[in-house]
Amino acid sequence: MKLLVATARTQGRRKNDFHFCVEGELVWIGMVCTADEQDPDGGCGCGRAFGGLDSRRSTTTALVAEVPGFSAGDYVEAIRSSIGHQGWDPSLAEEIAHGQLELIRDWPPGTVVERRLDEFVPRPSREGDRP
């Protein structure tokens, strides 16, 4: 199954990149706080971040990866468990999982993705490349 995982690939392309997740852990696209809701480069960082499901840390880059042995139900449960422990409404897990799967549907494994609020785009593989 194709899913988003944390990656350090292409870190540093933006001066405010960060990578505090465990490399390869599943990530989710979390909510954006009021400090960042108008500016992905705001001080919080949540407007440009993906959240690690296990570490509960964040990264500004995610990788589309083929994760063997995962079903759609497993993915929903992973999200439900993590967001529930983080204090979010776990009943949102199915909607979140579906949205993320739809987002990456047309991107091949190996694509590095960045977030700019509600916009998600592939990052170029090399500096100077266009996505």
Image (cartoon, rainbow, N blue to C red):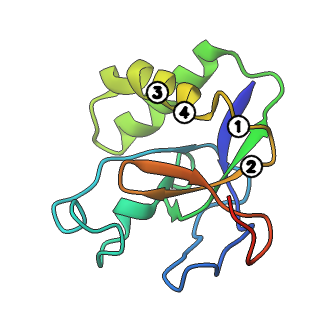
Residue 21 position by quadrant = bottom right
- What label does residue 107 carry, if any? 1
How would you rate the neighbour count of disc 4 (Cα within 10 Å): few for under 14, some for 14-19, many for 20 or more?
A: some
Question: Mark 2 or mark 4: which comes first in sequence?
Answer: 4
Question: Contact, CB < 8 Å: mark 3 with mark 4?
Answer: yes
In the rendered view of the protein, which quadrant contains the C terminus?
A: bottom right
Disc 2 element: loop
Answer left or right for 45 relative to 22. left
Identity of the residue drawn at 73% across and 77% down: 128
Question: Mark 3 or mark 1: which comes first in sequence?
Answer: 3
x and y, in percent, of residue 1 in the image: 75, 24
Question: Label 3 belongs to which residue?
Answer: 99
| Distance Cα–Cα, label 1 vs label 4 | 8 Å
| Distance Cα–Cα, label 2 vs label 1 | 6 Å
What amino acid is labelled 1 in the image?
Trp
What amino acid is labelled 4 in the image?
Leu
Residue 45 position by quadrant = bottom left
- What label does residue 111 carry, if any? 2
x and y, in percent, of residue 33 in the image: 22, 58
| Distance Cα–Cα, label 3 vs label 2 | 17 Å
Question: Label 4 belongs to which residue?
Answer: 103
x and y, in percent, of residue 72 in the image: 62, 15
Identity of the residue drawn at 80% across and 72% down: 126
What amino acid is labelled 3 in the image?
Gly
Identity of the residue drawn at 49% across and 21% down: 98
Question: Contact, CB < 8 Å: mark 1 with mark 4?
Answer: no
Q: Foreground: 54 or 99? A: 99
Disc 4 element: helix
The outermost residue toward the bottom is: 15
Answer left or right for 59 relative to 13. left
Question: Contact, CB < 8 Å: mark 2 with mark 1?
Answer: yes
What amino acid is labelled 2 in the image?
Thr
